[in-house]
Amino acid sequence: MYDFVGLGILIALILLSGGLAWWAWRARRLWMRLLGGIPATLLACTLLAAFGLALVGYQKVNRVYPNPVPDVQVELTPERIARGEKFARTCAGCHAPNSQFPMVGSNFIAEGPPLGTLWAPNLTMAQLRDWSDGELIRAIREGIGRDGRSLMIMPSDAFRNLSDEDVQALVAYLRNQPAVEPPSPPRQINVVGAFMLGALIPDAFFTAQPALAGPVEAPPAGRTPEYGRYLSSLGCQHCHGADFQGLPHTNEPPGGPSLRAAAQNYSEAQFVAMLRTGTRLDGSRLSAEMPWPDLEKFSDDDFAAMYLYFRALK
């Protein structure tokens, strides 16, 4: 995908400014060479650099990853669908307006500079009817779309930790949802967006992951630190740090406090109540950036397991 019109305009501006620079430097008068040649040369060089960075951005956008599609056929059992809802609720923060079902998609760049079209896609059968189960699993855990390109922004570095059973449960839940039209528009990055991807936006924006080498299993569900470690690996580290010691609030995504400290300062019941109600021990509310409502399908045992894991970390 290339914005050929934008690239063409950029090339025309490069040729125009380059021609002006050539004409100015050939002038007989020194003041004309200096006043005309220097600005025109600088403009031509700047536009040429912008063109090169835009090509770098498009190279990133269009890179195709060789990750194979898993050969999986998900069975839609009632138990699997019910478990999948637990994890699907965390998807609504990006894939649904105001984080509310149905997950009909959301425009990532509705505000800000015009960079093109970039949606968190519709996750109902209006969009997913043409996807195989293996393609959905690869998208969730490896951040790669049907076309083999990076989905961009998709937090697959955390979702790759979903066990084989849990990712199939999530797919079963998505498959069981009714289609809500229309499907999301295809991704289109204009030349301004490509320039920003090449010059300003870090490579972490492209979240494609290496192919999983083998089965992924979760510990048995229960009130254990081992199961708590599994659940906390599904996204908590993005805001609270890889070691759960907390990150500065200026971090992107917004940093959160130390979960190790929280587990030391709260009892198990208090920690569970905080995640259930969004209210701290002192009565203050959790930050609006903390997606605690997305955890509403987690059980108290799930929260207790996470507490025991964080507490064990000291």
Image: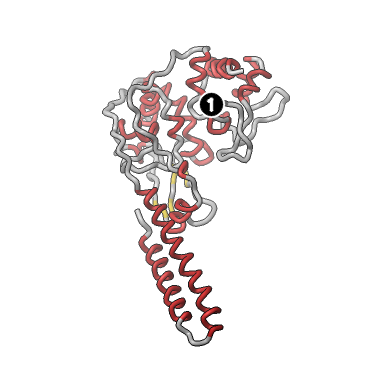
Q: Residue at x 52, y 24 (%)?
A: 232
Is residue 238 visible in this depiction of the protein? yes
- Residue occupying the point 43% across, 73% down: 18
Residue 102 percent coordinates (x, y): 45, 36
Is 188 located above or below residue 290 in the figure? below
Q: Which residue is mark 1?
A: 295
Residue 282 on image: x %, y % = 73, 24
Is 130 or 250 nearer to us in this picture? 250
Report whether 134 appears left or right of 294. Answer: left
In this rendering, would 197 be left or right of 276?
left
On the question of residue 178 being in view, the answer is no
**Front residue of 137 and 150:** 150
Instruction: Estimate the x, y position of residue 124 in percent, counting from the top left.
Output: 39, 37
Residue under the image location 43 percent in, 56 percent down:
53
The amino acid at mark 1 is Leu
Q: Is residue 195 above or below residue 283?
A: below
Which residue lies at the image location 46% right of the left edge and 35% below the top edge?
155
Quarter of the image for the C terminus: give it.
Answer: top right
- Residue at the limit of the structure toward the right, as seen here: 282
